[in-house]
Image (cartoon, helix red, strand yellow):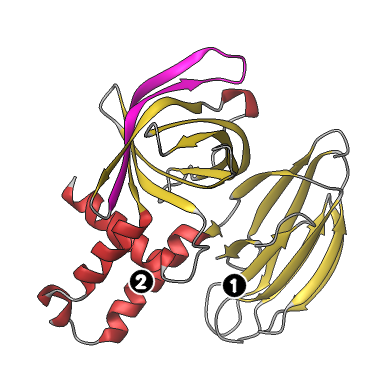
Amino acid sequence: MKQLFFTLILFSFSYFSHGQSGKTHEFIGTLQLSDGNMITFKISFNVDLTGNITDGVSVSDIYGADRTATTIKGTYDTIAKKISFYEVKNISTKASNEPEDFCYVQVKDGRIKKEKDKVIIMGSFKGKFPNGKSCGDGKIYLMDKNFLFKMGEKVMQSDRFKEMDSTGKMKQEIADYKERNEVFKLSVNEEVKFNWEGQELTLELWDGGNEDNDEVELYVNNKKVLDRLIITRNKKVLVVPLQSGVNVIKVLAMNEGSEKPCTANIAIRNSTLVEPTYLRTKLKVGEQAFIKLTVRDGK
């Protein structure tokens, strides 16, 4: 548990030190299942004048292979010191589950506890399949990111870190955590799934490391849209039309360059997303990875 808490502090420091909106409420912690298992969990949201949650997103299994981002709705009442929210639909996931097999978290009247500069959310949660059937329950425990950030600053200033070889080593650790939590990795035959809004996406592609002649091909729904592109630090930008239903983008490594493997950075966004979603390939020659986007009912 101590290791998990320390990891959360370091994650908080690396993630939030890169600038988040001061109006956004963000909490990070765990879902503690009734069977004894634990899942890392994060929520971020804004609140309107009536206390309704807007722009809400949860992220589960933050560090794991099943990392999933989901929209949330609910209420945040600082007077009654209660929060209620429920997950609505997945935005993105690395899990292999079918849509009907996802377990959505519901929290009713979670307690908002304030202790000096620390804000804690605690309470019970229930898990529900899309058909309404139960899929688990347990306890939720989250801490305000501002407190974790302050804890992170204290950790960075401790003797433990002052004894490290250089600040560069610490910066590398932070960069590693940041990459682990903000970028979807795409290794051989791996796929990331997204529920997509709109009939097109903007895709940016560039070299994820040093320019070393990494070369890729890109396919959209089995149609080649980029042929043996040598990627550089200059971004290649494509506007890709999408069809209703499932769309598959395939990235195929054609050359690993002088520094293996083939590391292609990819950013995707639609017209409603201010911030893009980032992905990075780590592929050998001939290996491929997939991005699957589901566009429902032409919306």
- The quadrant in which residue 146 appears is bottom left
Mark 2: give few (<14), some (14-19) or many (20+) Cα within 10 Å.
Answer: some
Across and down, in percent, residue 187 comes to: 55, 58
Amino acid on which the number 2 mark rests in the picture: Ile
Q: Quick check: can you spot residue 140?
A: no
* In the foreground, 158 or 210: 158
Q: Which residue is mark 2?
A: 174
What quarter of the picture does the C terminus occupy? top right
- Dot label at residue 206: none
Across and down, in percent, residue 295 comes to: 80, 40
- In screen coordinates, is 240 left or right of 204? right
Q: Is residue 183 above or below residue 51?
A: below
What quarter of the picture does the N terminus occupy? top left
Q: Secondary structure at mark 1?
A: loop
The residue sitting at 55% across, 28% down in the picture is: 102
- In screen coordinates, is 86 left or right of 124? right
Q: Secondary structure at mark 2?
A: helix
* In the foreground, 86 or 278: 86
- The segment highlighted magenta reads 118-140
Q: Which residue is mark 1?
A: 262
Amino acid on which the number 1 mark rests in the picture: Cys
